[in-house]
Structure formats: C-alpha cells, structure tokens
Image (cartoon, rainbow, N blue to C red):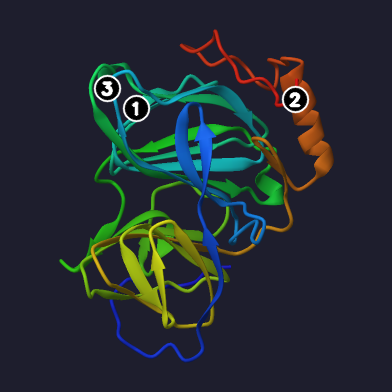
C-alpha cells in the first residue's frame, strides 16, 4: 500500500478526524541512562509497523556519566535512531562502527539476527554534554523477517527536508508527498520530524495508522492540548496540528504488518521464533549472534538468567 501525504501547512477543518488514544511516556533505565518509553504500552502496542518508541533525554550528562548499552541481540525488526543533540557510538556484529550525530539516521535491519552496542563516543567523554533523540523499532513484514541483516547510515544533509520558517520538516524514513527518504525500509511507512514556531499549523500525512509525539513544546490537535511526552494516536482523514509554543514533533505512520510477539529485544510474528532466539542468546550461539568487533568483551545476558 502506498499513499501521498502532503507536507505543506494547510488550514482546514478537521470534522472527520479525532484523537483515538493518548499515551504518556514512562521512564525506563537504559544502561544507566534514563529514557521515556512510549511504545509498546499497555493501551497500545503498535502504530502501523512501529512497535517500539523511546524518547532519549533531553539530558545533560556530566563528565563522569555516559550511555553504555552493552552488546545485545535483535531479530525480525529494524531499529532507527535519530538525534537532536549529542552523539552515540554504534557498533554491530557486521563490523559497522561509527558515531551518529544530529541530523543523521542509523537504520539497522536485524533480519534473522544481529548484535549491537550503543555507547558514549570516546571523544565525548570527560566533558559535560547534552543528549536528546528518538529510537524506534519497526517490525519487519513476514517476508523480510529472516533476510540478511544490514546497517545503513544516512549522513547529515542527505535526508529530504523543507517547509517554511514557521514549520520545517525532515523526512526520516518512507515517503512524504513526492519526497522519499534514502533509508531502505521493508514496508511502506512515514516518519517525519517537524520543528514548529508558536502558532504554526501543519496538515499531518495520511496513513492507515498514524500518531504524533510531542518531543518538545506543546500542540493543539482536534480540540485537545498535548504537551511534551505525549503520543496521540489519530483517526480520520484530514487532521491538523497547531503549535502553541516552540515545538518539535515526531510523526509515525504506516500499514500494520500483523500481530507481533515481543520479548526483551526480540520481535517476531511467531512465539516460537522468539523462544528460539532467546535460547540461542542464552547459550551464546555465535553462529546466529556473532561478537561485535571492537566490543567483544561484554554482553547483556538474557533477563532472568
């Protein structure tokens, strides 16, 4: 399925649109670093293919603090990392090794299995610094679950972007109108970041399922207010958002890929695949889950073992 959302601000009525659900982010610890988890939640597991959504920061990290997420595995999903501030060092079992910085995208297609770590870059240690961004997981469609893993880094400046001084957008993945991100997605989806001035209005893209998350600021949508840390799951055809203060907004949408089982870092269309992956990680099966070059000495054990 494909759709053609419009990226330009439009001011029209939203008679047939509504907010179906509000989800408030909950704090979680991620390797000594606190994040706000949005998906999955008790009230909503997925939006389209998006099955996981973490808001990192915004946080000021002291010289002695850092993000140290040791090597851990994934199957049957893709991770997508985008930063507003700071840097994270990515390493994986394919041999990928590079920092991600604001304006770039890391897309890691786990396929049948991959291992990676996320740490504070050595160049950033020993000084006070900021970290702020979003990491999401996209469940792969059935036909892509057991494909070869790959990693794609899209450098700063290579993502489609545009808008006005009051409403700037950047397309992280998928399609927005005639624009398409270079990220190698496995199913149709749209992921956009907007930066809005106070009073700016935008028309949100269409999608079979869609939601907006307020990463900073505050918005008005369908007659309701939403502040930082709130995800609004939306229904209806046309829907507009108005920023009531300087705002950073994330839009996610796409077609559902079907029910998914999720356990720790594993996502799959079958419980059997998740249980087998858990067994292989617990038994340190390096055939499926190889060591991470440059980060071979540590690994996160399977919870409960």
Structural crowding at the residue carrying mark 3, measured as other residues with C-alpha within 10 Å and reported as few (<14), some (14–19) or many (≥20): some
Q: Which residue is mark 1?
A: 99
Q: Quadrant of residue 122?
A: top left
Vertical arrangement, residue 175 with respect to residue 199, above or below: above
| Label disc, if present, on residue 304 of the rendered structure | 2
Front residue (pair 231, 192):
231
Instruction: State how far apart marks 2 and 1 are (Cα).
Output: 31 Å
Q: Are marks 2 and 1 in contact (CB under 8 Å)?
A: no
**Sequence-wise, which precedes: disc 1 or disc 3?**
1
Q: Tally the numbered discs.
A: 3
Image coordinates of residue 218 in percent, x first then y, are: 33, 66
Instruction: State how far apart marks 3 and 2 are (Cα).
Output: 33 Å
Disc 1 is placed on an element classified as: strand
Left/right placement of residue 142 relative to residue 199 reads right
Image coordinates of residue 188 in percent, x first then y, are: 54, 60
Q: Nearer the viewer, mark 3 or mark 2?
A: 2
Residue shown at 77%/15% (left/top)?
Answer: 283
Vertical arrangement, residue 163 with respect to residue 301, above or below: below
Image coordinates of residue 247 in percent, x first then y, are: 28, 62
Instruction: State how far apart marks 1 and 3 are (Cα).
Output: 11 Å
Structural crowding at the residue carrying mark 1, measured as other residues with C-alpha within 10 Å and reported as few (<14), some (14–19) or many (≥20): some
Disc 3 is placed on an element classified as: helix
**Sequence-wise, which precedes: disc 3 or disc 2?**
3
Left/right placement of residue 270 relative to residue 70 reads right
**Sequence-wise, which precedes: disc 2 or disc 1?**
1
| Label disc, if present, on residue 124 of the rendered structure | 3
Residue shown at 44%/36% (left/top)?
Answer: 152
For the N terminus, the image quarter is: bottom right
């Amino acid at each position: 399925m494909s759709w053609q959302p419009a990226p330009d601000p439009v001011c029209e009525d939203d008679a047939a649109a509504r907010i179906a659900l509000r989800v408030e982010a909950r704090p979680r610890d991620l390797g000594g670093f606190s994040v706000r988890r949005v998906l999955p939640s008790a009230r909503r597991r997925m939006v389209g293919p998006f099955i996981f959504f973490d808001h990192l920061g915004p946080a000021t990290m002291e010289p002695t603090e850092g993000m140290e997420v040791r090597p851990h595995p994934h199957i049957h999903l893709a991770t997508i990392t985008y930063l507003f501030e700071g840097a994270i060092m990515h390493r994986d079992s394919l041999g990928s090794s590079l920092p991600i910085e604001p304006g770039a995208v890391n897309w890691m297609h786990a396929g049948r299995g991959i291992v990676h770590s996320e740490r504070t870059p050595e160049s950033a240690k020993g000084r006070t610094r900021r970290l702020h961004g979003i990491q999401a997981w996209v469940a792969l469609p059935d036909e892509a679950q057991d494909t070869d893993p790959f990693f794609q880094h899209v450098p700063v400046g290579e993502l489609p972007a545009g808008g006005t001084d009051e409403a700037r957008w950047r397309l992280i993945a998928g399609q927005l109108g005639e624009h398409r991100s270079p990220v190698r997605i496995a199913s149709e989806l749209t992921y956009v970041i907007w930066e809005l001035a106070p009073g700016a209005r935008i028309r949100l893209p269409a999608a079979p399922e869609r939601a907006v998350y307020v990463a900073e600021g505050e918005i008005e949508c369908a007659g309701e207010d939403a502040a930082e840390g709130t995800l609004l799951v939306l229904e209806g055809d046309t829907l507009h958002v108005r920023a009531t203060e300087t705002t950073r907004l994330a839009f996610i949408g796409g077609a559902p890929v079907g029910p998914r089982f999720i356990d720790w870092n594993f996502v799959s269309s079958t419980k059997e695949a998740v249980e087998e992956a858990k067994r292989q990680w617990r038994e340190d099966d390096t055939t499926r889950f190889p060591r991470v070059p440059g980060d071979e000495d540590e690994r996160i054990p399977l919870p409960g073992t």
